Image (cartoon, coloured by chain):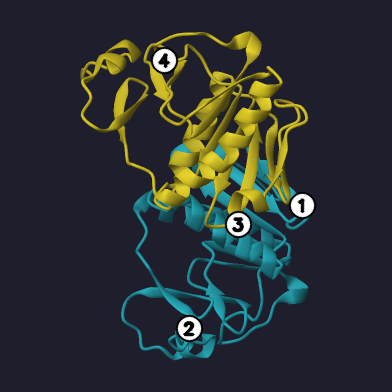
Chain colours: A yellow, B cyan
Amino acid sequence: MTVDARLMTADELLRLPDDGYRYELVRGELKRMSPGGAKHGKIGMRIGAPLGTYVVGRRLGEVFTSETSFLLSRNPDTVRCPDVAFVRTERLVDTDAAYPGAPDLVVEVISPGDTHAEVLRKTAEYLNAGVQAVILVDPRRKSVIVHRPSGATPLDEVLAVEDVVPGWQIPLSAIFE
Amino acid sequence: MTVDTRLMTADELLRMPEDGYRYELVQGELRKMSPAGEEHGHIVHEIGRRLGNHVYERKLGRVYGPDVGFLIARDPDTVREPDVSFVRADRVVPTPKYFPGPPDLAIEVVSPNDTYSEVRAKKDEYLRAGVKAVVIVDPPTRTVTIHRPTGVEEVQGTLTLEDIVPGWSLPLSDIFA
């Protein structure tokens, strides 16, 4: 049996000197994130901005931008930075460290180089950590699919997650056009 | 406006001299396929063998491996080679050319470098062409999903496709050894 190299913790990740890159931690292993393209960032905002306006206006919770760290599991630590995340009011924690837990809702915008296995693995990780709905947005196919613990649902015309953010919806055309 | 380079047809692809590579045609554009890894080949062969045994014993139709082209769209032509496919008996067309239409079932085993968008775009194409079910097997995450025009289902434990191949079942533990 070989001895693993020592794994990094979420606290160590937070104290890591800034080198211009963003990192995630997957079961204690550091993963450098490649900077996203313009289309990726635009689509993230087209969902995050209206979602933020909606939930903050109704005091339903807060929406977090893509540099926010969520400590999804400990020992070994997994820290992920979803493209857009929502946490409902009762679960909000005011901290300068990573949010200690999973968001209620995650939006991930697929980049052209994202492998199938990596997207599936990340989605499973979010759901196992307690995220209620993971929205996968594929700009190249103009497709949106919502993954919940109970299964996956492709959306045709309107993005809505009634069980997580009641009443909120935006047409897919407002995301992709 | 620019003029497109001339697109290739299925007949031209069929007449192309052998150069050791396999190709698909996606809306008239030639796509070279890279040779697969060992795990991919093993899983493809094992699914094909198990499905083939069931189908041929019961004369349900024909099962094909990853070297058969299906002409799933014309003008511009799209020729795809699913890793494993099934055509039921009444739709079989013996021909030295590509099968003139979609299979009833297409199974794709994802390679580690396949991107999410590519895999899902191919799945979309198959369903649009009339394939009844597309099965996506992702070895790194040991997940299998069945995509139908009506939605998506994640397989738990045993793969069955009662509506397409009655009586057939494949425990996932047999392919993800």
Specify the subunit that label 2 lies on.
B
**Camera-side residue of B124 and B49:** B124
Q: Is there one chain holding both mark 3 and mark 2? A: no
Say which mark, if any, is on residue B150: 1
Which label's residue is closer to the chain start, 3 or 4?
A: 4
Judge depth for marks 1 and 3 and give the one in front.
3
Q: CA distance from mark 2 to mark 4?
A: 50 Å
Q: Which residue is mark 2?
A: B1
Q: CA distance from mark 1 to mark 3?
A: 25 Å
Q: CA distance from mark 3 to mark 2?
A: 21 Å
Which label's residue is closer to the chain start, 2 or 1?
A: 2
Q: Amino acid at mark 4?
A: Ala
Specify the subunit that label 1 lies on.
B
Q: Which residue is mark 3?
A: A177
**Label 2's element?**
loop
Q: Which residue is mark 4?
A: A98
Is there a contact, CB below 8 Å, between mark 2 and mark 4?
Answer: no
Q: Amino acid at mark 3?
A: Glu
Indicate the quadrant containing the C terminus of chain A: top left, top right, bottom left or bottom right.
Answer: bottom right
**In the image, is residue B147 above or below residue B16?**
above
Judge depth for marks 4 and 1 and give the one in front.
4
